[in-house]
Image (spheres, helix red, strand yellow):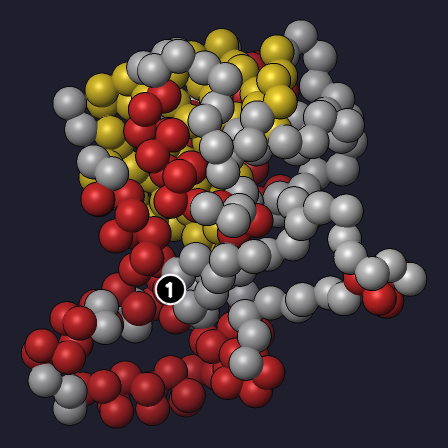
């Protein structure tokens, strides 16, 4: 099997969660190397894969189709019981379209599991304060090129949890849970900064707190969370 493109802790979390679900038809998109798909298949699920780049896929006995999450995926509506989208949304030009497609492809009551960078942990907030960026933006000129051949592997959209929640609920999903990949022990040294932010926001009006979703954005899971958020949502009937 090839390189794992997402954190192994994220894969482990998803395998543990799916092991408690009834077996069904699952789409993994983007599929990457197929490492996660292979593990899900071993649980007894019927697994289908989709990715814009098929060259890295090495899982055996699993169908993969080429598809662009910015556009319509090559599957009929209501085909899947589950969809996993691991470290995918932040790479898209149009993550809103991907969520709409997931809603189309899922059966009523189907579940969507998404993982994406936790841009709201205190470490990343501090990095943004210093650099003005949530993640590195490489230059093609460092590779001796005028432009990249494609942008698939770059983080294009810093999708924060409140925006993801807005899109999911707008497209008919209900969020069931929010989790993290693992603890980041070194962030405990930034706790005084977190306390300062919470104290500052304590004096905001109720309307301001609601407008900026402080119940979510200052929650321990987000501000002191790991590198990755894992969000589980269910499609309405």
Q: Residue at x 29, y 37 (%)?
A: 233
**Does residue 148 appear to the left or right of 201 in the view shown?**
right
Q: Which residue is drawn at 62% across and 22% down?
A: 66
- Toward the viewer: 110 or 167? 167
Q: Is residue 56 visible?
A: yes
Vertical order, 180 against 121 (above or below): above
**Does residue 101 appear to the left or right of 155 in the view shown?**
left
| Residue 98 pos. (x, y %) | 42, 37
Q: In which quarter of the image is residue 9?
A: top right
**Mark 1 Cα-neighbour bin, 10 Å: few <14, some 14–19, many ≥20:** many
User: Outermost residue, front direction?
Assistant: 146
Vertical order, 174 against 37 (above or below): below
Quarter that holds the C terminus: top left
| Residue 131 pos. (x, y %) | 59, 83
Q: Which residue is drawn at 84% across and 66% down?
A: 141
Quarter that holds the N terminus: top right
Vertical order, 186 against 33 (above or below): below
User: Outermost residue, left direction?
Assistant: 206
| Residue 192 pos. (x, y %) | 41, 89
- Toward the viewer: 75 or 83? 75
Q: Is residue 21 visible?
A: no
Q: Residue at x 91, y 62 (%)?
A: 144
The residue that disc 1 covers is 222
User: Outermost residue, right direction?
Assistant: 144
Q: How many marks?
A: 1
| Residue 216 pos. (x, y %) | 26, 64
Q: Does dot 1 land on a helix, a strand or a loop?
A: helix
- Toward the viewer: 219 or 132? 132
- Toward the viewer: 194 or 185? 194
């Amino acid at each position: 099997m090839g390189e794992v493109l997402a954190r192994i802790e994220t894969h482990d979390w998803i395998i543990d969660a799916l092991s408690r679900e009834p077996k069904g038809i699952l789409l993994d998109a983007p599929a990457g190397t197929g490492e996660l798909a292979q593990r899900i298949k071993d649980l007894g699920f019927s697994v289908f894969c989709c990715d814009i780049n098929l060259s890295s896929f090495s899982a055996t006995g699993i169908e993969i189709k080429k598809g662009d999450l910015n556009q319509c995926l090559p599957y009929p509506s209501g085909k899947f019981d589950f969809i996993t989208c691991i470290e995918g949304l932040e790479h898209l030009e149009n993550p809103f379209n991907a969520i709409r497609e997931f809603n189309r492809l899922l059966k009523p009551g189907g579940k969507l599991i998404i993982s994406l960078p936790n841009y709201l942990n205190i470490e990343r907030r501090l990095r943004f304060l210093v650099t003005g960026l949530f993640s590195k933006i490489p230059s093609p000129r460092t590779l001796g090129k005028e432009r990249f051949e494609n942008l698939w592997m770059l983080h294009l959209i810093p999708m924060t949890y409140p925006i993801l929640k807005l899109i999911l609920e707008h497209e008919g999903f209900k969020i069931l849970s929010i989790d993290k990949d693992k603890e980041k022990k070194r962030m405990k040294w930034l706790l005084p900064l977190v306390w300062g932010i919470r104290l500052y926001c304590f004096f905001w009006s109720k309307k301001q707190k609601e407008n900026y979703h402080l119940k979510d954005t200052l929650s321990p899971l987000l501000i002191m969370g790991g590198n990755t958020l894992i969000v589980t949502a269910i499609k309405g009937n």
